[in-house]
Image: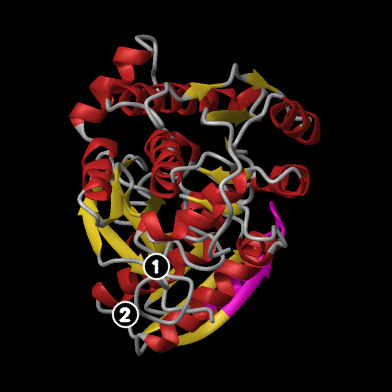
Amino acid sequence: MSSADASGDGILRIGLMLDNTGPQNFLNAPQLAAAKLAVQDINAAGGHKGKPVELLPETISTDTAAQARALAAAKADVVIGPTDSSHAPAAIDVLANAKVAVISPANSAAALSNYKSNGYYFRTSASDVAQASVLAKLAKDAGAKTVAVLHEEGGYGKEVAAAVADAAKQSGLDAVADAQFTPGQAQQAAAAAKAVNPDAVVLVAREGAQGAIAELNNAGLAGKKLILSDEAVSRYGSGLGAQALDGTRAILPGVFPSAAFQADLVGVDPGLKDMVFAAETYDAVILAALAAAAAQDDAGTTIAASLVAVSGGTNSAGGQPAGQPAGKACTSYKDCVDALRAGQRPDYDGQSGRLNFDAHGDITEANYMVYTYGADNLATMTGTETATSSRTVG
């Protein structure tokens, strides 16, 4: 999308799709608090065209299609969510058909980059495969010349492992093995890795991570040689043998929330105990409002058409969005609106970092927190890394 006719009703309505129940329900609270905080900040700066932006009443459900239909019926112009990548297709199918923009703060499945949304789908979280260059860099920074990859069966494992192997080669490392395993049956894969005697091992896993680490430890490939993908990170502690992960490095997507942002979130929800996806949710709401402000229209089609420009991204190979003035970096809704009033194109860099969207609706720069495990098999944040996408789409 590059342009759209004004068709909104003058009231910007933002829906929030909370889809976590059971053990994952802790993910709902930080997203809700962040969305409320963003709307407060937008309204404190004048709202949309002088009217308060509305955050529609939230519901929690795993029936994504029903949620999407209800939000469309409530006249949402943009929906923030869903959290779970597996729920995204159902949300996109309903909302894109209803001409409602969708911005997920948490979807990471690589396949969603090419899911047909007619330009209505975006995400402020990085695709799973974006981490590959960081995982390869950690190996190289530690002096490795050869790297083996163990990956759990399934889309996540296969896609990230392939990306890691490619990133390793591009950085001058020799990718000497890529072994697949099923959860609970990683002994053969660990043996295959041991046979090539790699300098570093990257484990790409989810449910089967702990069992795979145990097998790698038995094979002498844990500790400082081991690097964990984001879904393999956990507080393992006594669940693994003593010092199994001593020196192991791992990454998690995003940035550590600033003290000020954390305080603001707690001000919205005093009982808040977790900040997961809060920054990405806050930024998604701000970007939606900025897209509406830039176009002076709150229709979902208009918001979707304006998101790339206000994020500082581009729909093509290089340069700025067609017909747009040079971007002005800004870090708050108020500052970005001031840039608009000065005749400049806002380039929003938010709580989660730079957010330049590409033609797929993906961010082109992804931030990661680096963790190092100690002898107690617990991880401590020890640094940050940034992955930049080189993909351009005409």
- Badge nearest the viewer, 2 or 1: 1
Q: Quadrant of residue 247?
A: bottom left
**Residue 18 drawn at (x, y percent):** 61, 28
Residue type indicated by callout 1? Leu
Taking the magenta stretch, the answer to whether it contains residue 132 is no
Residue bearing mark 1? 135
Given residues 256 and 380, the one toward you in this image is 256
Q: Residue at x 46, y 54 (%)?
A: 307
Q: Secondary structure at mark 2?
A: loop
Q: Which residues are magenta?
A: 178-194
Q: Of marks 2 and 1, which one's residue comes earlier in the chain?
A: 1
What's the coloring here? secondary structure
Residue bearing mark 2? 144
The relative height of residue 128 versus residue 55 in the rendered view (above or below) is below
Residue type indicated by callout 2? Ala
Given residues 296 and 256, the one toward you in this image is 296
**Residue 142 drawn at (x, y percent):** 25, 72
Image-based side of 239 in relation to 46, left or right: right
* Disc sitting over residue 388 in the figure: none
Q: Residue at x 60, y 19 (%)?
A: 58
